[in-house]
Image (spheres, helix red, strand yellow):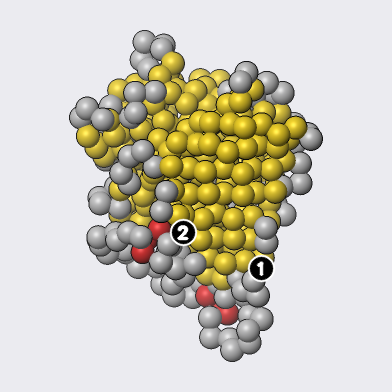
Amino acid sequence: MTLRRRPLLLAALPLAWTRPALSLPATQLEFPRDYGAHPAFRTEWWYVTGQARAAQREFGFQVTFFRTRIGATQGMRSRFAARQLVFAHAALTDVQGRKLWHDQRIAREGFGVAAAAQGDTHVKLRDWLLDRRSDGYRTRVPANDFTLDLQFAPTQPVLLQGEQGLSRKGPQVENASYYYSQPQLAVRGSVALQARRFEVTGKAWLDHEWSQALLHPQAVGWDWIGMNLDDGSALTAFRLRRQDGSALWDGGSFRSPRTGLQNFGAGQVVFSAQRRWTSPLSQASYPVEWTVRTPAGPYTVKAVIENQELDSRASTGAIYWEGLSDLFDGRGNRVGRGYLEMTGYAQPLKV
C-alpha cells in the first residue's frame, strides 16, 4: 500500500532499532522538501504503480524504492558502515501474455551506488532511478528481463492521506506514518520486453510514506488498493489484518473532482474476499477478487491476471502479491483500474 505499502517488506533483515517507538506529531507537510528522503525515520518508500498501453498491448507496472535506517550502526565512524539500506523492486504485468516479470536490488547507501536524496525525490540504486523534475517524475529501470523508461506528469494536486498527511495504521498512536499520494499521473514513455520496445501511454499512481513504527504487534500484513477512476476520482482503501484474517485497522480516502476529498475513519472500510487463487510457488492463498465497502460506496476489485505474486526474498525477505486490477461500482460497471497489494499471506510481515 502503499503502506506501501506500500514499503515495506523487511522480514528477513536483522534490523536493530533501539529507540522506543513514539507517536508521530501532526505536522504540515512541505513541498518540495517532503518529496525527498527522511533519513531519521526507520522506514520509507516511494511507490509507483500504473497501467500502460501500446496499440492492443496492455501492461501493468510497479516501481518501488525503499529506504531503511539501521539503528545499530548510526554511531559507527567507518564510511563503510551500513547506516541506510536502499532496496528496489520492479515488476511488469504483460496482460496479453498473462505473465508477471519482476526484479529486485539491494545495496547500502553511498559510494555512488545507492542514494535517497533529501529535499526532493531522487532515489537510485545502481542504474535504477526515480527522479522528480519540474514537469513530473521519471523512472528508468533496466531490469533483467524488461526495461521501463517512463515519465509521469501530475494532473492533480498532491493528496494528503489521513489527517493532513498523518495516517493512522493501528490502534496505538505510534502505528502511523506520514503519507501522501499523487493519483491520476499521466504516463508516457517506453516498455521493452523480450527484444521488443513499445511506446506507451497510460495512468499511474505514486505513494510516498515514511514511519518509525508502522505495524501493530498483532498485524501480520495488509490489503490495500490505489485506484484511478475513469472520471478523475481516486480511491484508496486499506486494512491491517490479524493472524485469523480479521481486520485490526482500516482506512483510506476518496477524492472526486466534483465533491473533493473524503477521508475514511477506522471501522468504515470493509474488505470481503470473493475468490481466491493459490500460488504454486509459495502455496499462499490470495483473494484475487474482493468487495470493498467504503463511505464513498461499494466496489468490487478483480485482478486482471491471477499470478502477480512477487518473491522478494533476495532483497526484503518477503513474498507478497501486488498487481494490476480492475475496479467495478456497485452496479457492476467497470469504473477504473489500479493496483491491489496483499502482504502477510505467505508469512507474517515485519516492518
Tell me residue 37's x, y (percent). 45, 64
Q: Callout 2 environment at 10 Å: few (<14), some (14 to 19), or many (20+)? A: many
Q: Nearer the viewer, residue 171 or 30?
A: 30
Q: Relative to 181, does residue 65 appear above or below in the rendering?
A: below
Q: Residue at x 46, y 54 (%)?
A: 132
Q: Is residue 273 visible?
A: no
Q: Mark 2 highlights which residue?
A: 121
- Residue 325 in view of the camera: yes
User: Residue beneath label 1, please?
Assistant: 113
Q: Earlier in the sequence, mark 2 or mark 1?
A: 1
Residue 112 picture location, percent across and down: 64, 71
Residue 177 higher or lower than 97, as above or below: below
Q: How dense is the environment of label 1, judged by Cα within 10 Å: few (below 14), some, or many (20 and up)?
A: some
Q: Quadrant of residue 58?
A: top right
The residue drawn where x is 41% and y is 53% is: 134
Badge 2 marks a residue whose secondary structure is loop
Classify residue 231 as left or right of residue 5.
left
In the image shown, does 48 or 150 lie closer to the viewer? Answer: 150
Q: Which amino acid does the dot numbered 1 rest on?
A: Val
